[in-house]
Image (cartoon, grey):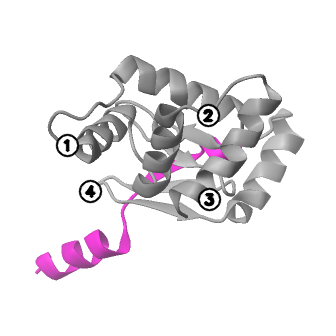
Amino acid sequence: MGTDDLAAPLAEQLRARGLRLTPQRARVLAAVSALEHATPEAIGARLREEAGPGGSAPDTSTIYRTLELLESLGLVWHTHLGRGAPVYHASERPHLHVVCASCGEISSAAPDLLDEAAERLAAELGFTVDVGHVALSGTCRACRNRAAQETP
């Protein structure tokens, strides 16, 4: 998805709230989309890299405020993947996150994989699962295969 593809819905939603599309807002949203799952610090690093020497990039507090605004508009989601800062991703569709505890790889999975568990949680506890914020920790196939090859 290109920057223009992202800017149009952002501009429309901002105007509806009496706000304007600033270059920083557009750049933060483009960085979130390009990085897929990134902390505010990683987003800032990308923006500084794109700006180059002598270019300007928003500071970390501006990035956090922009991410909060984008999330309130429904354009990004955040997820806590364990320790550290939350990661942000474009909200094209809700999905759950699968994180390898060995290598740190983050994969996305269809939310319907949790349908049965979500139904049980609702029935037994009255609890509604917010799939966009779900992160499951485990071991990816590559790490399991590597471990199996190392075991005599």
Name the one closer to the observer, 129 or 91. Answer: 91
Q: Quadrant of residue 53?
A: top left
Residue at mark 4: 102
Which image quarter is the C terminus in? bottom left
Q: Residues within 10 Å of mark 2 (few under 14, many from 20)?
A: some
Does the magenta-highlighted stretch encompass residue 142?
Answer: yes
Toward the front, the furthest residue is 54
Element at label 4? loop
Label 3 or label 4, whichever lies nearer to me, is: 3
> Looking at the picture, which amino acid does disc 2 mark?
Leu
Side of 116 relative to 91 (left or right): right
Residue shown at 53%/27% (left/top)?
66
Residue at mark 1: 52
Label 1 or label 4, whichever lies nearer to me, is: 1
Residue shown at 62%/26% (left/top)?
69
Q: Residues within 10 Å of mark 3 (few under 14, many from 20)?
A: few
Side of 33 relative to 99 (left or right): right
Q: CA gap, disc 3 to disc 4?
A: 35 Å
Q: CA gap, disc 2 to disc 4?
A: 40 Å
Q: CA gap, disc 2 to disc 3?
A: 14 Å
Residue shown at 61%/48% (left/top)?
7
Q: Which mark is residue 5?
A: 3
Side of 27 relative to 90 (left or right): left
Q: Which mark is residue 21?
A: 2
Element at label 3? helix
